[in-house]
Amino acid sequence: MFATLSDRLADTFKNLRGKGRLSEADIDATAREIRIALLEADVALPVVKDFVAAVKERARGEEVSQALNPAQQVIKIVNDELVEILGGETRRLRYAKTGPTVIMLAGLQGAGKTTLAAKLALWLKEQGKSPLLVACDLQRPNAVQQLQVNGDKVGVPVFAPEAGNTGGNEDGGDPVGVARASIEEAKRRLFDVVIVDTAGRLGVDAEMMGQAASIRDAVQPDEVLFVVDAMIGQDALTTAQAFLDGVGFDGVVLTKLDGDARGGAALSIRQVTGRPVMFASSGEKMTDFDVFHPDRMASRILD
Ligand code: GDP
């Protein structure tokens, strides 16, 4: 669809092999190509600016090697910087020292939370854990049922308000009460990880943030994961900022990476919020899920 950065730089450096240091003109031309490539990959503009400045600084100090051509050399610098910003090594989940580990999911409606909850449960099961899924999205019609269907697919039980019993609350029940009760249930039945799915709205909204914050206060999660659809592109950053302010989160899950999004959201969110992307979700199957690999994402952004 777009020219890759490698193609762009190969053009820029056609006549440059083995010329000593890159000239300022070469560096400016390089910077321009990197800027375009990152913007096309959906990286937010302020993040692009900082990133390009850092790469320029590094490129100035480097000799053009005889072995690599200048394009390859710049690509290597860009790739190294991307991997570093994306978190270097994958950040692992923190488990509670005593009692069940509580993981709370937050994000907009449609981000992929309910799907992700079950994928994460399956992944944890494969790590030898015994997870419990908790349905606290009592707003979206069918969200509880959808979690139950997904829970069945991965063989993980779902804690949900009894059918027809919403505590007399016409809004669909009391998600904070359900969340709190789920922790007691997990302790009683010896589940060691509790995954709390929460309600999202189509846009950022104070009531939704308030509810998520109340659930957070009730269950004191070990990890709050912000779930975001990679396909929303640059909007991912504003959404992440709103959730960081409204609920707070420890890590990010990027979903729908099977689509054609280039994944620049990962870079923007990491750089601006300081929170690492921890998992990647890439399809409708329960196994379309993995820990996040910064090096793979760097290639995706560049290629
Ligand atoms: P929630 O509102 O945040 O709970 O989002 P859902 O889990 O209901 O997901 C919204 C839609 O996106 C559903 O149709 C899912 O099947 C779909 N979905 C979720 N994750 C992925 C993914 O990684 N790839 C693709 N292609 N679709 C996904």
Image (spheres, rainbow, N blue to C red):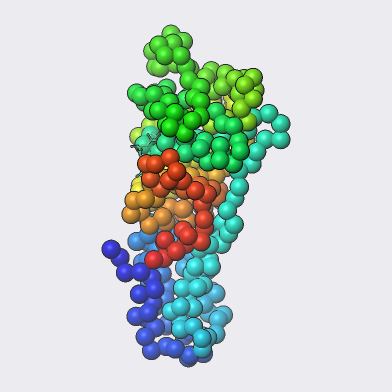
Residue in the foreground of this view, choosing between 63 and 159: 159
Point out the residue furthest to the bottom here.
19
Point out the residue furthest to the right here.
97
> Which image quarter has ligand 1?
top left
Q: Can you give x and y, in whole percent of width and height, for residue 240 in the image?
A: 46, 44
Residue in the foreground of this view, choosing between 289 and 105: 289
Residue in the foreground of this view, choosing between 290 and 212: 290
Q: Residue at x 56, y 34 (%)?
A: 103
Q: Can you give x and y, in whole percent of width and height, for residue 62 in the image?
A: 55, 81
Which of the image's four quarters has the C terminus? bottom left
Say if 150 sits above or below 254 in the image: above
Say if 65 sits above or below 82 in the image: below
Image-based side of 137 in relation to 126, left or right? left
Q: Residue at x 61, y 27 (%)?
A: 191
Q: Residue at x 47, y 76 (%)?
A: 74
Say if 294 sits above or below 256 in the image: below
Q: Quadrant of residue 138?
A: top left
Image-based side of 178 in relation to 163, left or right? right
